Amino acid sequence: MASYLANYQKKIRILAKQEQKLRCLIQQQAEKGRLWMLSAVVKEARIRVLNAQKARFSPRDTSERTSRLANLDRQIAAVRGMTLESILAEFEGSGPTVTNGD
């Protein structure tokens, strides 16, 4: 099965696509409603990626596993606590800016 992608890899690719869409919409100066909707999608995609990373750990209870899971739980909580405005602000500064050559 050479074409098989693990579930977490699909989630990472989906997140990258959604983030790229958000960058494009910001550059195109799209309406705020579309930006808000897509930033909510990016937020949920980030949570899905982190949850997929959690699922990859073996069920054995080791101190390393426990600390990694606690770290991922903190990251998930941080993403859940982000506002849509903060996600938009994160992307507004990224990417090349287009100038008119003056």
Image (cartoon, grey):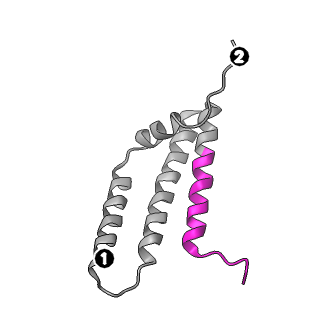
* Residue wearing tag 1: 64
Q: Mark 2: few, some, or many residues within 10 Å (few <14, many ≥20)? A: few
Q: Earlier in the sequence, mark 2 or mark 1?
A: 1
| SS of the residue under disc 1 | helix
Q: Residue, x 51% and y 52% (percent of image)?
A: 42
Residue 48: x, y in percent? 48, 64
Q: Position of residue 35 (x, y in %)?
A: 55, 40
Q: Does residue 74 appear left or right of residue 48 in this picture?
A: left
Q: In this rendering, does residue 8 appear at all?
A: yes
Q: What amino acid is found at the position of numbered circle 1 in the picture? A: Glu
**Range of the magenta residues?**
1-21
Can the viewer see residue 30 in this picture? no
Q: Amino acid at mark 2?
A: Gly
- Magenta span: predominant SS is helix
Q: Is residue 92 magenta?
A: no
**Residue closest to the far front:** 64
User: Which residue sits at x=59%, y=37%?
Assistant: 95
Q: Which residue position is annotated with label 2? A: 101
Nearer the observer: mark 2 or 1; the answer is: 1
